[in-house]
Image (cartoon, rainbow, N blue to C red):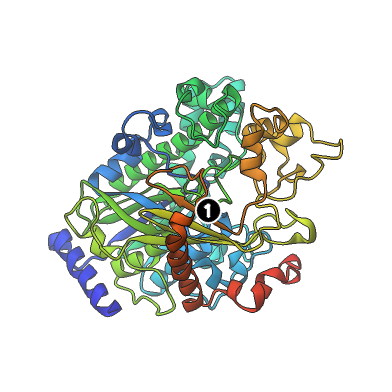
């Protein structure tokens, strides 16, 4: 079947490139840290009233308009390293050994990764900034330092901090932003000028600026995003107060910085004459950091991400509902490059969807995705224990299994009940101060500081309190996943069916969580020694 799909992809690409049919396409993959489903292209689909009303991403939008915008793209794990392990390997994160966790992760060189497979198949490969991290060896699945292109610098990763410093030294806002965009352009240009001469290329652009922390107020200062334009648009798990709105506006500002970089890289691609034969794919590694329901949570706000692809062989101008798990990009890229897809990959190629002409639901088999997590911050809980979760997300439901409901999902509430509560400054700037599986920031600080206020304490309990073993959400009626129906008798059959389906997938793919009560992940010594 894989040989058939590879042949199909090659034929589609040949048809799309006409007289250049002998050329395999280049691949430009733009992948932002901590960027969820926040782009103005989604506002056009959702209609007025969503948080996406406030963000402007014209470059992402143009790629989506020229190709395919996916409405239901999900990460396999909402934590940086395991998400990237799954994406690079084309497998569920739980199949990547010590790559399935964050702190203490190591990469098993026996696991095939699509960048190195493309390189072995005749591609030039390269990257700027982050690909696989944190972990040892750093960026191993793309060649480590050997394929890195950062000659122009790494300041883009601290966009708001660097831009603010330049402005203080006398630069205008536009001059400061241009300096950082020139860096991103320079790194990519150095790759194009030294690689890809007579060979196809695959380049990964992975800035970390959307990852915390940011300069408070930078969304307004640098991008003219009014925090109060979010008033009335906040999801029910976030307090609709100025402090939280400003924090989210600053986050959206970093997303707009990433979008501006998309623009300059595409300009360089056109300047080089390689644009027409390049597949452009754009996404992020999970939802927003430092916000309830976001990063490290299996709710949509933490796992659903932006995704658009355009280029040779891709039927353009379409909005697609089909469920996509980001590991599906691995076989998709390999088939585009006419490189055999390893049998160990559990992901499914996107070519039947990309090459179609339909909008909406295209592939009847793409009705759901599997998601999970184990350990994020090493010392989040007593004994350095993980918080194991697995989930299945379908058109109608989200079912989550919390395998250790006796533990706190976002880490222990250190010092919150002993009279030694962290200060506001510490809550904003030190992730490890308390509840360490959620990044520090103003939103987290505000919710923690208002945890005993009768008006706001439900936000704290909902975000950080212990959760039952099973959670079921009817996403048609409850899109923000606030009302757990797992104990509702009317949904008993749904719970049984989805739990059976999820456990069957875990068993079929060798999830260590089902073996000997999860000893592989529970034995923290194998991770803490790294």
Q: Helix or strand or loop: what does disc 1 sit on? A: loop
Quadrant in the rendering for residue 442: top right
Quadrant in the rendering for residue 354: bottom left
**What is the tally of numbered marks visible in this picture?**
1
Identify which residue is drawn at 31% across, 59% down.
26
> Left or right: 319 with respect to 477?
left
Identify which residue is drawn at 43% across, 43% down.
478
The x, y position of residue 464, in whole percent, is: 66, 44
Quadrant in the rendering for residue 97: bottom right
Vertical order, 116 against 430 (above or below): below
Identify which residue is drawn at 40% across, 80% down.
343
Q: Quadrant of the N terminus?
A: bottom left
Say if residue 196 shows up in the picture: no
Q: Residues within 10 Å of mark 1 (few under 14, many from 20)?
A: many
Q: Residue furthest right?
A: 419
Vertical order, 214 against 18 (above or below): above
Vertical order, 100 against 45 (above or below): below
Q: Quadrant of the C terminus?
A: bottom right
The x, y position of residue 410, in whole percent, is: 66, 49
Identify which residue is drawn at 50% across, 71% down.
503
- The residue indicated by pointer 1 is 298
Foreground pick, 511 / 498: 498
């Amino acid at each position: 079947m894989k040989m058939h799909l590879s042949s199909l992809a090659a034929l589609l690409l040949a048809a799309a490139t006409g007289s250049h049919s002998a050329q395999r396409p280049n691949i430009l993959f733009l992948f932002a840290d901590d960027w969820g489903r926040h782009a103005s292209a989604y506002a056009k689909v959702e209609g007025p009233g969503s948080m996406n009303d406030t963000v402007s991403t014209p470059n992402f939008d143009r790629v989506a308009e020229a190709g395919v915008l996916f409405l239901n793209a999900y990460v396999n794990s909402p934590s940086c390293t395991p998400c990237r392990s799954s994406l690079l390997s084309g497998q569920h994160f739980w199949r990547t050994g010590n790559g399935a966790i964050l702190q203490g992760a190591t990469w098993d060189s026996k696991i095939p990764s699509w960048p190195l497979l493309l390189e072995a198949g005749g591609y030039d490969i390269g990257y700027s900034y982050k690909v696989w991290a944190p972990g040892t060896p750093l960026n191993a699945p793309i060649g480590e330092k050997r394929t890195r292109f950062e000659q122009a610098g790494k300041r883009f990763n601290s966009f708001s901090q660097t831009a603010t410093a330049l402005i203080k030294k006398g630069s205008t806002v536009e001059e400061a932003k241009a300096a950082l965009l020139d860096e991103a352009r320079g790194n990519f240009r150095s790759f194009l000028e030294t690689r890809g001469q007579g060979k196809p290329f695959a380049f990964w652009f992975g800035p970390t600026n959307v990852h915390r922390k940011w300069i408070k107020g930078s969304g307004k200062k640098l991008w003219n995003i009014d925090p109060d334009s979010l008033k009335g648009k906040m999801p029910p798990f976030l307090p609709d107060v100025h402090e939280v709105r400003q924090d989210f506006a600053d986050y959206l500002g970093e997303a707009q910085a990433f979008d501006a970089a998309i623009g300059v890289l595409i300009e360089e691609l056109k300047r080089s004459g390689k644009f027409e034969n390049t597949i452009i794919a754009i996404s992020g590694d999970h939802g927003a950091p430092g916000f309830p329901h976001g990063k490290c949570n299996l709710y949509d706000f933490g796992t659903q991400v932006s995704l658009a692809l355009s280029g040779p062989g891709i039927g353009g101008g379409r909005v697609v509902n089909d469920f996509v798990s980001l590991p599906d990009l691995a076989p998709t890229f390999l088939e585009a490059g006419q490189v055999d897809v390893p049998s160990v990959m559990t992901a499914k190629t996107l070519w039947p969807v990309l090459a179609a002409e339909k909008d909406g639901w295209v592939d009847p088999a793409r009705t759901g995705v599997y998601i999970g997590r184990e350990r994020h911050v090493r010392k989040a809980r007593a004994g350095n224990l993980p918080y194991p979760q697995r989930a299945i997300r379908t058109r109608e439901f989200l079912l989550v299994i919390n395998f250790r409901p006796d533990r706190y999902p976002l880490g222990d509430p250190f010092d919150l009940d002993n009279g030694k509560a962290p200060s506001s400054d510490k809550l904003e700037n030190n992730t490890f101060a308390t509840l360490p599986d959620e990044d520090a920031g103003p939103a987290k600080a505000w919710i923690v500081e208002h945890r005993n206020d009768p008006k706001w304490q439900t936000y704290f309990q909902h975000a950080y309190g212990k959760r039952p073993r099973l959670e079921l959400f009817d996403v048609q009626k409850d899109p923000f996943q606030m009302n757990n129906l797992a104990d509702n008798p009317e949904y008993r059959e749904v719970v049984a069916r989805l739990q059976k389906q999820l456990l069957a997938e875990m068993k079929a793919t060798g999830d260590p969580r089902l073996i000997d009560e999860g000893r592989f992940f529970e034995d923290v010594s194998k991770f803490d020694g790294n």
